[in-house]
Image (spheres, rainbow, N blue to C red):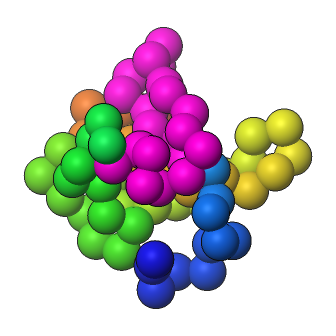
Amino acid sequence: MTKLPFPANCPVVVVLSMREAYEFANLDEAKKVYPDLDPDVNGQNFTWAMHDKVDGQPVMRFESWAAEAIFSR
């Protein structure tokens, strides 16, 4: 799945903006909507995967470059 240490079938969060984010059961489901997600390298539209938590559980988080620019200020 990935070289990074994420749990198997880790849930995924894709953040597009401050007010728009989507949760998926796993990377395969997220890639059906956003096929260019890659946990190991930055892509044209999204950052590589980051560790995050939702309700105390680990998730794989991707940010659009627009969201990353806002959160990195």
Against 58, residue 5 (above or below) is below
Q: Residue furthest top?
A: 19
Against 34, residue 57 (above or below) is below
Against 34, residue 17 (above or below) is above
**From this viewpoint, is residue 64 visible?**
no
Q: Where is residue 69 in the image (x, y as percent from the top left)?
A: 31, 37
Against 16, residue 6 (above or below) is below
Direction from residue 49 to residue 40 in the image, left or right: left
Q: Does the magenta stretch include residue 14?
A: yes
Residue at image position (84%, 38%) is 55
Residue 68 image-quadrant placement: top left
Image quarter (top left, top right, bottom left or bottom right) of the C terminus: top left
Query: In this picture, which residue range is highlighted in magenta?
Result: 12-31
**From this viewpoint, is residue 35 visible?**
yes
Q: Please give the count of numbered marks on the rendered protein.
A: 0
Q: Which residue lies furthest to the bottom in this view?
A: 3
Residue at image position (87%, 46%) is 56
Residue at image position (44%, 38%) is 14
